[in-house]
Image (cartoon, coloured by chain):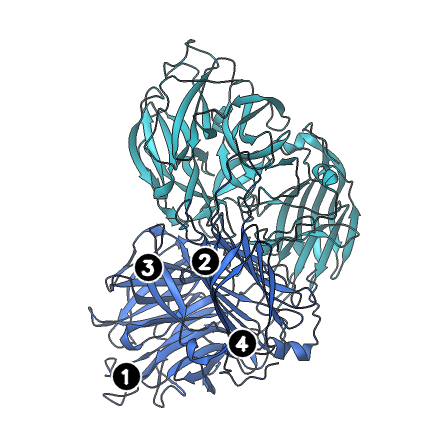
Chain colours: A blue, B cyan
Amino acid sequence: MTDRKTECSVALTGKLYRPSVHFTPPTGFMNDPNGLVFDGTQYHLYYQHNPDAAYSANICWGHATSTDLLNWKDQPIAVPDTVDGQAYTGCAVLDRDNRSGLFANAHGTNIAALYTRSLPTRQSQYLAISDNNGQSFEEYAGNPVLDIGSPNFRDPQVIFHEPTQKWVVVIAEVDHHRIGFYASNDLIHWTHLSHFGPAGLPTVNYECPNLIQVRDEAGAMRWVLFVSINPGSPMGGSVTQYFIGDFDGAVFTPCDAILRLTDFAKDAYALQVWSNMPDSEAVNIAWMGNWQYCQELPTRDWRGAMSLPRSMTIIQDTNGYPRLVQKPRGVEKLRLPLLSEANRYLAVSTRREIPLPVGKAIEIVIRLTADEYRQTEPGQNGPVINRFELAFANEEGEKLSIGYDVPSSQIWLDRSKLRGFDHPFFTGRFAAPVNTAYYPDARSVDLHLFLDGCAFELYANEYLETATALVYPARPLDRLRLVTEGTGFTIETLEIYTLDKTMCRATL
Amino acid sequence: MTDRKTECSVALTGKLYRPSVHFTPPTGFMNDPNGLVFDGTQYHLYYQHNPDAAYSANICWGHATSTDLLNWKDQPIAVPDTVDGQAYTGCAVLDRDNRSGLFANAHGTNIAALYTRSLPTRQSQYLAISDNNGQSFEEYAGNPVLDIGSPNFRDPQVIFHEPTQKWVVVIAEVDHHRIGFYASNDLIHWTHLSHFGPAGLPTVNYECPNLIQVRDEAGAMRWVLFVSINPGSPMGGSVTQYFIGDFDGAVFTPCDAILRLTDFAKDAYALQVWSNMPDSEAVNIAWMGNWQYCQELPTRDWRGAMSLPRSMTIIQDTNGYPRLVQKPRGVEKLRLPLLSEANRYLAVSTRREIPLPVGKAIEIVIRLTADEYRQTEPGQNGPVINRFELAFANEEGEKLSIGYDVPSSQIWLDRSKLRGFDHPFFTGRFAAPVNTAYYPDARSVDLHLFLDGCAFELYANEYLETATALVYPARPLDRLRLVTEGTGFTIETLEIYTLDKTMCRATL
């Protein structure tokens, strides 16, 4: 029923789909990012990892380091699977001044990790410390440090809350569909503070809570609580929801009754944030995956990718809702210009093609405006169809289509015309409103796109909309197609780049 | 870019896609159901209607009546488009004892309607009364009766609130993303009570609020507030969200912070409820449409369909959330048995086909259980794939697929393999979790399906999940296919019926 045929050989798909600037595991399976911390010199990316096979089993913490969040250097497994359980998701924090008292050095690169040891009947939280800059960890002898006797209690993330001078952990009380908050002075002894939820979608599992302060457009720092849920996304399966609000060191209070999702496609799960970022920059990374199909993707020797790192701020959108802005971080320095133009007019029914190199990550920045139009008078004509499409395509008729419908101010993402992967849960089409004031004269749209092997990212509407999608063409997409329907468009700016490879994996 | 080719001729598609038991307009365009009221003898279905063309313009109230909510008799246009504006969505109420004082008769079939007159710069609420059992309405001379000077203030629904002995209207304050509550003694003079929202999805338009009491499993009546939103559905475009809570005659207070959607596909919008139902039965009907593509559907002489009427109750699901149960109402009496079997075993990798008659509405009730299975031990094997698929198919390779993934307890609906309609916003695949307690031994699933021209409805998990989807095969789907993968399934019950035609439209 799933028609999992690909038109590529298995050997080819591994390379065709390998990204060159998105992080992927050397071999085997990868899911959640973990333990994201900047140690003062380098960024750590730990990740849920099965090095031996491309599906979820025997999970340990894989590890890579970087000085720019883009060029990653593989490191040895940092936290192994043990008889105490698989090493499930958790966090790492820098305790420079040894506030916990756990470290031999009063000052230094003191990294502590808190993560879930998972057995079939019990999930409990383990503390570990590193004396070698996060290369490996020694588990605390008194583990577990946080255990409520539940098989579903996981994914701790620790912050140091300055006003109360306490460590605070947010953790998923999965069976209760809520997030627990606990405080500690030493990372060992934890006191229950409060819980948040159920809130948002009426789903099964709450997972991977992350709490962080994000700067808004007025310069104020606002608390954001991320909660990943699975299954139960309206788009199917796994999705990350977030709440904007206050946190007083004990209780999280959302600022409104609005449910927000980080992404309008369905491959951005288990979003995590870096701790100890300079200037309190809020940076996230998400696993490009969805539990509905992540273990059946058409790469057999490796599965799983991370999104680009994204710098976050909060702005009020045109409907008055405070919402997250996510911008891909630092990619500019990888750019090799391929095409740049401005103020070029595309008449109605234009179909323009631009060749693209194969095997390179492609970045496109485009801003365009439709010709002025008037809503037709009722009864005069049929509905107004004014659309712009940008498609990555090939000669075999495959296309990855992104478009803008002017009258309804909505964008689409359509991966349904790619033939490399077919699965009953692999949804093809996604959409989001942009410029969303009611009945706007919203003729302009801005799109920022990355296509990098199987990793596709779309940012739109001044980075208020993000779509993260795995894409599997059967053959390389070797051309860009620009198509207009019903109206002309002025391309105000179009920039196309290839990106310098940052990952050492074997690509096409 | 939209590849709107169909493999059928235009003449054919009108008939191929015409439902025989779902309500469709005689000609032209239909969107929201309106003014749903039982007058003591017959049910009224008014509807947003352009009789002259199959897109939205010159909207008036179409009208049909029924004594069973299934066999509908067309009536003349009830509320015309006038110089005061198009006749947008509203309600009708029976004022049997003339509590409003508007009617000549102290007791009788006194029907009052309140609806939005829509001009480009102003939407205001008009009162009208009928002295001929709802066949036509006379507008009150002092209209509008409710006007806040807004171009976006619409879709009033009136209830009589017994405890306070007042008429209460819920109405969309569209620009404020909220629902207004007003009270009146006479349906003419309205006093603002409160508002609800923003709540739920951070969307543009709030529309079509409906407030009703629904019985829960303990027999208590709970208030449910429906709010349709467009655009901004996570599935794209239009969607109906609902809130369960208390209403004291002035203020609606939700019982929790959960966002609920009425449907997990994307063609059930502007859901409305019947007023004055015997025994306080809560019955809804939804427009099978989505503003993303409703005016471009491949039927050219008519567009728009209503869902089956659905009787509602509230139960607590296995995760502890109170949620709506929606059951198709009264369809049993239309059934003509085609096949009935019990306790039939389908081994692994079975592919069984059952021929289906063409041009008839088909109903299928099936309950099945997968063989016992154990989650494989980590590292022993790949991921567990245990799936069941039921597909409406044809020789040309088209299929409308519904399935159950046992390990993740999720069902899917896949219309992406049908070739009669292609549109960038016409999402192909939808999914929902069922039996959603965590790590359940959830090997059973119940499905209840209706395929009737372009109208497809899926009910699952004891009617806790509903999916309403327009479907456009290029050729008739003339066989049912049952497929197993990875495990055997026991079909506990399988019933297939054709349904007696209730609508007088010309079908295939």
Local crowd at mark 2 within 10 Å, few (<14), some, or many (≥20)? many
Q: Are marks 4 and 2 in contact (CB under 8 Å)?
A: no
Q: Amino acid at mark 2?
A: Val
Position of B332 relative to B446 (above/below): above
Tell me if A265 is positioned left or right of B356 in this view.
Answer: left
Q: Secondary structure at mark 2?
A: strand
Mark 4, other Cα within 10 Å: few <14 / some 14–19 / many ≥20: many
Sequence-wise, which precedes: disc 1 or disc 2?
Answer: 1
Q: CA distance from mark 1 to mark 4?
A: 44 Å
Q: Eyeballing the image, is B366 above or below A404?
A: above
User: Label 4: which residue?
Assistant: A361
* Mark 3 residue crowding within 10 angstroms, few (<14) / some (14–19) / many (20+): some
Question: x and y percent of residue B410 in the render?
Answer: 58, 56
Q: CA distance from mark 3 to mark 4?
A: 30 Å
Q: Nearer the viewer, residue B232 or B218?
A: B232
Which type of secondary structure does the marked residue at label 1 adopt?
loop
Considering the numbered disc 3 on the image, is that residue within a helix, a strand or a loop?
A: strand
Looking at marks 3 and 4 on the same chain, the residue that comes earlier in the sequence is marked by: 3
Quadrant where the C terminus of chain B sits is: top right
Image mark 1: chain: A
- Asked if residue B485 lies left or right of residue B185, the reply is right
Which residue is at the front of the view, A183 or A231?
A231
Quadrant (top left, top right, bottom left, bottom right) of the N terminus of chain B: bottom right
Pick whichever of labels 1 and 4 is earlier in the sequence.
1
The residue tagged 3 is: A315
Q: CA distance from mark 2 to mark 3?
A: 18 Å
Residue under the image location 48 percent in, 14 percent down: B109
User: What number is the disc on residue A445?
Assistant: 2
Report if residue A495 is visible in the image: no
Q: Do tags 3 and 1 sit on the same chain?
A: yes
Label 2 lies in what chain?
Answer: A
